[in-house]
Amino acid sequence: MNIEITDAAFAWFRDELALNDGDSVQFFVRYGGCGDFQTGFSLGVTVKAPEDPATTVEKEGFVFYIENKDEWYFDNSDLLVDYDQQKKEIQYLHNKET
């Protein structure tokens, strides 16, 4: 399982979350909402240091990660985080690992 953050998504996170140098961004599973991976669940985002990361990616000095306890949600898929210019919001896409 890998995480990819596009440049447009990174710019959105940096601005919207007012990230400071060295911050870490966690993608976590929450009950409810409209998710693309598991019915009845969706992704939340918070600025928080990793505790037990399943996967991480660094972009321009910032770490984006998913904890081991939330890895089930992705069902062996990679996470692509992009920014939808038309909707003006983050979108989460996945590619099933082969």
Image: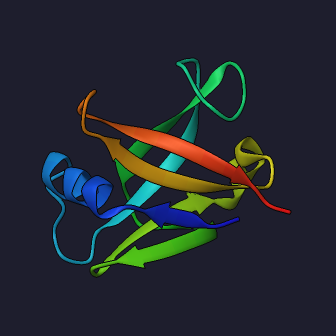
Residue 75, percent from left and from top: 80, 47
Q: Which residue in the rendered view is the most extreme toward the right?
A: 98
Q: Nearer the viewer, residue 95 or 3?
A: 95
Q: Is residue 21 visible?
A: yes
Q: Residue at x 71, y 21 (%)?
A: 39
Q: Nearer the viewer, residue 90 or 66?
A: 90
Q: Nearer the viewer, residue 41 or 10?
A: 10
Q: Which residue in the rendered view is the most extreme toward the bottom?
A: 61
Q: Quadrant of the N terminus?
A: bottom right
Q: Is residue 52 visible?
A: no
Q: Which residue in the rendered view is the most extreme toward the front?
A: 86
Q: Residue at x 72, y 42 (%)?
A: 73
Residue 23, percent from left and from top: 28, 69
Relative to 78, 18 lies left or right: left
Q: Residue at x 41, y 78 (%)?
A: 58
- Position of 30 relative to 68 (above/below): above
Q: Quadrant of residue 49?
A: bottom left
Relative to 93, 95 lies left or right: right
Residue 37, percent from left and from top: 68, 35
Q: Quadrant of residue 63?
A: bottom left
- Position of 8 relative to 36 (above/below): below
Q: Quadrant of the C terminus?
A: bottom right
Residue 32, percent from left and from top: 58, 18
Q: Residue at x 22, y 50 (%)?
A: 12
